[in-house]
Amino acid sequence: MTHRVLAIGVLVAAVSALSVATRGAEPLRGISIAAFSANSLAGVAADRSLTDVKNLGADAVAINFSWYQADVESTEIGPHDTKSATLESVGHCIDEAHRLGMKVMLKPMVDVRSRIWRGRIQPRDADAWFRSYQTFINTFADLAKRKKVEILCIATEMNTLEGVENEARWRKAIREVRRRYDGKLTYAANWHEGPEAVGGYRAVRFWNALDYIGINPYFPIATTTTPTAEELRAGSRAWMDIVEAWRGETGLDMPVLYTEIGYPSFDGGAMTPWGSDESGLTPDPDEQAAALEAFLSTVGEREWCAGMFLWRWEPYPHGGLRHPTGHTPQDKPGEKVIARFFGGSAPPVAPVRESLE
């Protein structure tokens, strides 16, 4: 895909679009930071990354980390010895984000040690699994309360557990979280569409127990590897039309928060935004930048949009050098696109040696 630069007028209009009021509040301009080791959210590197996020113009950060279960049928959830962020490191990251003047969405997730996607978890005993999940989410509801976190995401992409058979279990879990935590609640639902899709935002039965409808909108916005800027914007708007129609059909008079959205930087990434396997792919950071421009230029057009958290920023500066086809926009053209739309400035390019330390 060739590099495309939109006119300054379009960029200015898009910045204005991000300021559309949603129920009296400006949409959140958020970025996700993710931890996959015990202490990666604490220390000098993570603090520098948060500063870079703030300088981009972000006014909120989603802090992502995981606890684990052994396999998809397991009923016990707990921290991984090396992959799960410690409570201390999560607390440090919250404090640093607040010090920088950003709001926080705490987003604890459950993953599977055998690396099967969490959306396929089917515990052998649902009651036992939800008891374990309650302990897990209570841990972070208590932390969110102590640290005055603005938003808590109660779960992420639990596709096979979203149906009517578990509605009462989820509502019970949410009531217990609300007893402990008085901030806003959301759930990060997968975007799944189509006759073979299992779960997804349409399947969730407990939206009215929360404050935001949370969607991870990894909708494909292109049908070829060479889309034009207008085709990408049209693709983005088409999916927003679908979400808008669904809200109308269900009568859910609630704001939508895009809890996780981004585009990988490989050729064809706008066709498969959820793609994350970096092996054997052709880097195309210009396509990532064009997809981000399309999304950011259209997301603020809907009054029901409460904002977004872009996926994702690494907890160390210049992470794009390690992930040339991944979702991070660091050290790629997408970094500057975000800065333009968020009203900030991209970090300076660092020497390769410093970037990889």
Image: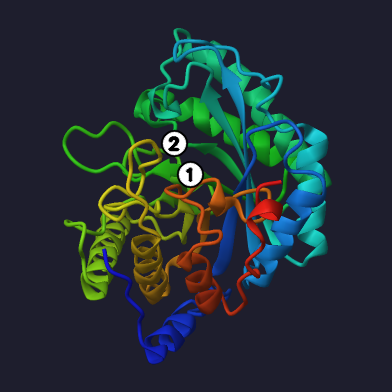
Residue at screen point 63% across, 73% down: 57
- Comparing 328 with 182, the one in front is 328
Which numbered dot is residue 250?
A: none
Provide the secondary structure element on which disc 2 rests. loop
Residue at the image point whose x is 35% and y is 68% from the top: 290
Identify the residue at the far top of this view: 124
Residue 49 found in image quarter = bottom right
Quadrant location of residue 87?
top right
| 18 shown above or below 184 | below
Does residue 281 appear left or right of residue 47 in this picture? left
Q: Nearer the viewer, residue 251 or 106?
A: 106
Residue 3 rendering spot, x and y as whole percentages? 33, 71
Q: Which residue is mark 2?
A: 157
Q: Is residue 148 visible?
A: no
User: Which residue is label 1 attached to?
Assistant: 188
Q: Position of residue 232 (x, y in %)?
A: 26, 67
Give yes or no for contact between labels 2 and 1 (Cβ–Cβ under 8 Å).
yes
Please tell me which residue lies in front, 177 or 218.
218
- Disc 1 element: strand
Tell whether 235 sits left or right of 173.
Answer: left
Q: Mark 1: which amino acid?
A: Ala
Q: Residue at x 64, y 62 (%)?
A: 60
| For residue 55, side relative to residue 158 (left or right) | right
